[in-house]
Amino acid sequence: MEEKKMRPQDKWNEKAGYISKSYKLKREVVEAYAQACEQAGVSQAGQLTKMMNEFAESIQKEQ
C-alpha cells in the first residue's frame, strides 16, 4: 500500500500547528463578516482568531 505524499504546504502547516476546520454558517452572516473585515482592513482569519481567543479567555476566567 502506498503512503500518501504530503505537499510542502501541508508539512509546513503541520509543523506550525495549523489545522483546517469547517463550519456551516448562513450565507448572509459570512458575507457581512467578509465585508466588515474588508472595511476594517483586517484579514478574516486574523479577526476570527482574535475573536476566538478573546472568547476562550473570557470563558476560562469565569471558571
Image (cartoon, helix red, strand yellow):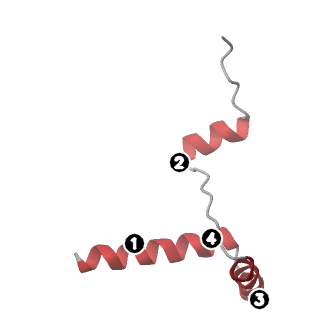
In the shown orientation, is residue 15 left or right of residue 55? right
- Mark sitting earlier along the chain (4/2): 2
Q: Secondary structure at mark 4?
A: helix
Using the numbered discs, state the Cα–Cα distance from disc 2 to disc 3 in whole angstroms.
29 Å
Which residue is situated farthest in the left direction here? 63
Q: Residues within 10 Å of mark 4 (few under 14, many from 20)?
A: few
Residue type at the position of mark 1: Ala
Residue occupying image coordinates x 68% and y 24%: 4
Residue type at the position of mark 3: Gln
Q: Secondary structure at mark 2?
A: loop
Using the numbered discs, state the Cα–Cα distance from disc 1 to disc 4 in whole angstroms.
15 Å
- Mark sitting earlier along the chain (2/3): 2
User: Of 33 and 6, which appears nearest the observer?
Assistant: 33
Q: Where is residue 51 shown, x and y percent of the image?
A: 52, 77
**Residue where numbered disc 3 is placed:** 39
Q: Where is residue 54 shown, x and y percent of the image?
A: 44, 77
Question: Decide: marks 2, 3 in contact (CB < 8 A)?
Answer: no
**Residue where numbered disc 4 is placed:** 46
